Amino acid sequence: MRFVNAADLQLNGDFGAFTTSTSAPAILALTGNNLAGGPDIVSLSLTSDLTLLALENFVTAKASYSIGELDDGLRVILGGVTLLDFDQDDWEAAPAMQEAFGALWTPWSAEGAPFELEISPGNINLYVTAKEGVNVGQRVDILTLFTPLTQNAPTLADFNLGDFNLTLENANHGGPGELRDITATIEIEIAMIPEPHSGSLLLLAGLATLVRRRRG
């Protein structure tokens, strides 16, 4: 699709049919069938192909997922490199998690949902609503409350949408696992390079939103 005064971003993945708008920022909404549960890994992939015009420059991008339920961990892979990997074995005994959620956090029953995963150059965060403790009722980054098996923030080069493949998977310490009610968003920032004798620099953002609803 063509963003108004911005780059051309082609998005593909396990998200079914989609519709687009022509307003700026453009919005791409996708819906698909239920992919929840089962003994196998639930895997959702997103790829893109970014084409810049002569006077456009890629500045940065951010990917985010809003998840309604998960059992009982996550794995995120970008360009074949694992950015995040954790399950219940990693967070169950962490004192800070017990303070925020009591004896046992139950993300498979949507406790603290929506679970908002944000991935950008230099950062990876997972925001959940605390149920107890000093932060009760507040959104907290639970990746600061325990030590995941793997946690590697991507670089800006990793986030170049011209060569981009992002995969979200469930991780589970011993059961079937699941992911439900997922909304995925890619936001890109493009700088318009000024023409000769122009003293201004216009920053525009293109927004693509993908919706995966999973019930059952």
Image (cartoon, helix red, strand yellow):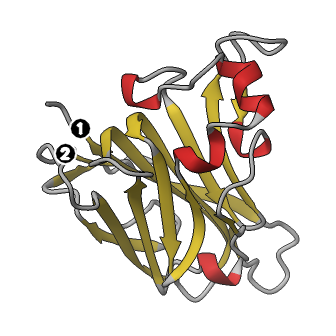
Is residue 69 positioned above or below 62 on the image?
Answer: above
Figure quadrant of residue 197: bottom right
| Residue at 42% across, 38% down | 67
Residue at (71, 60) in percent of width and height:
203
Label 1, residues with CA under 10 Å away: few <14, some 14-19, many ≥20: some
Q: Position of residue 90 (x, y in %)?
A: 63, 49
Q: Residue at x 55, y 38 (%)?
A: 116
N-terminal label among 2 and 1 = 2
Circle 2 residue: 31
Q: Secondary structure at mark 2?
A: loop
Residue 186 — which label?
A: none
Q: How many marks?
A: 2
Quadrant of residue 141 within the rendered picture: top right
Q: Amino acid at mark 2?
A: Thr
Is 28 or 54 nearer to us in this picture? 28
Q: Which residue is mark 1?
A: 213
Instruction: Give the crowd class for mark 2: few <14, some 14-19, many >=20 residues within 10 Å.
Output: some
